[in-house]
Image (cartoon, helix red, strand yellow):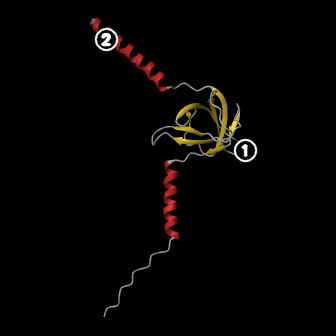
């Protein structure tokens, strides 16, 4: 039977305490808490990987959280429910767009407030939306535009050479 060294035991305990402190710091610094406030919905044709718990931002500032997603059985649109901070009142002409947080980042909803004086209340809906555009969609549009612009332009004529003398 081997005897354990008390220094190894103390050192192991110190490592566990430091790891626990690191986890508490990481959780508090990452701001993973959901924003609570009033609920607003928006309908999208394509959500592109948006998840429950994703951020809702205005000018890059987190003002809400995605709380639910479901499919409207009549229109087959994705209905996204968001909880918006109580101190943020959205104009009725606000636009909601699903955007990516970089190439490998997650998705979030970017709100672009309008100029209307009327406000969206609790349980209201954002009617102006822009669907998520994936990288594949953008590349497809570029290829489509490149092939169509080449087809509509007149073919260049071959240069004429002078006849040999």
**SS for tag 2?**
helix
Q: For mark 2, what is the residue? A: 11
Where 10 falls versus 23 (above or below)? above
The x, y position of residue 45, in whole percent, is 63, 46
Closer to the N terminus: mark 2 or mark 1? 2
27 or 153, which lies in front?
153
Tally of numbered tags: 2
The local crowd at label 2, few if under 14, some if 14 to 19, many if 20 or more residues have their Cα within 10 Å, is few
Which image quadrant for residue 66?
Answer: top right
Where is residue 9? Give x, y as percent: 32, 8
Residue 75: give x, y in percent of width and height: 70, 45
Residue at left 63%, top 27%?
A: 87
Q: Residue at the spot x=39%, y=84% of the render?
A: 160
Q: Is residue 5 above or below residue 21?
A: above
Residue 126 lies in what quarter of the image?
A: top right
Between the residue at mark 2 and the residue at mark 1, the CA separation in whole angstroms equals 62 Å
Q: For mark 1, give the secondary structure.
A: loop
- Judge left or right: residue 89 versus residue 136: right
The percent position of residue 5, horizontal first and vertical second, equals 27, 7
In the displayed structure image, the side of residue 161 where residue 151 appears, left or right: right
Horizontal relation, residue 131 to residue 160: left or right: right
* Cβ–Cβ under 8 Å for marks 2 and 1: no
Q: Which residue is mark 1?
A: 74
């Amino acid at each position: 039977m081997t005897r354990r060294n008390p220094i190894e035991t103390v050192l192991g305990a110190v490592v566990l305490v430091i790891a626990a402190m690191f986890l508490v710091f990481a959780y508090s610094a990452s701001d993973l808490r959901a924003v609570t406030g009033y609920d607003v919905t928006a309908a999208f044709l394509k959500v592109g990987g948006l998840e429950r718990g994703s951020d809702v931002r205005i000018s890059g500032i987190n003002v809400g959280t995605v709380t639910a997603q479901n499919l409207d059985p009549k229109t087959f649109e994705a209905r996204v429910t968001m909880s918006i901070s109580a101190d943020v009142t959205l104009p009725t002409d606000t636009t909601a767009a699903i955007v990516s947080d970089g190439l490998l980042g997650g998705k979030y909803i970017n709100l672009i407030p309008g100029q209307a004086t009327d406000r969206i209340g609790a349980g209201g809906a954002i009617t102006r939306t822009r669907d998520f555009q994936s990288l594949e969609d953008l590349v497809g549009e570029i290829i489509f535009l490149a092939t169509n612009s080449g087809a509509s332009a007149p073919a260049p004529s071959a240069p004429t050479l002078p006849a040999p003398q």
